[in-house]
Amino acid sequence: MTLNVLYFAWLRERIGLPSEAVETEAGTVAGLVEELRGREERYALAFSDLSAVRVAVDQELTDIDAPLDGAREVAFFPPMTGG
């Protein structure tokens, strides 16, 4: 399946892209992250500490073990803070 993957804040800076179309066979977000980590060092660095990464699938906040069945978009971003 092809997913539109979005990167925000420091994830965008480390990977060097705001978004990309990713062809994946991953069944979960965690599987997608593993595929991305294996691509290049910049992805491995961006996803080195998953406790500092939040995820949304089709614009709904979810966790790293969320299924990707039928998903069209996955967004990765740092935790949100208030102020």
Image: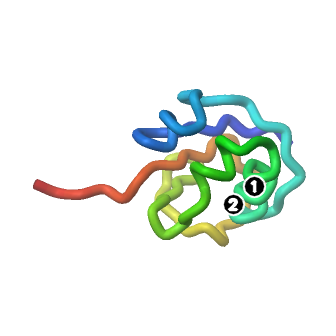
User: Disc 2 residue type?
Assistant: Val
Left or right: where does residue 34 sit relative to residue 52? Answer: right
| Pointer 2 residue | 29
Left or right: where does residue 25 sit relative to residue 14? Answer: right
* Residue at 65% in and 67% down: 66
Residue extending farthest right: 25
Residue 54 locus on image (x, y percent) = 47, 59
Q: Secondary structure at mark 1?
A: helix
In the displayed structure, 41 sits above or below 29; it is: above
Residue 16 locus on image (x, y percent) = 57, 29
In the displayed structure, 76 sits above or below 28; it is: above
Residue 32, numbered label:
1
* Residue at 63% in and 42% down: 73
User: Disc 1 residue type?
Assistant: Leu
* Residue at 70% in and 49% down: 71
Residue 67 locus on image (x, y percent) = 72, 65
Left or right: where does residue 4 sit relative to residue 62? Answer: right
Residue 65 locus on image (x, y percent) = 66, 71
Spatial CA distance of label 2 from label 1 is 5 Å
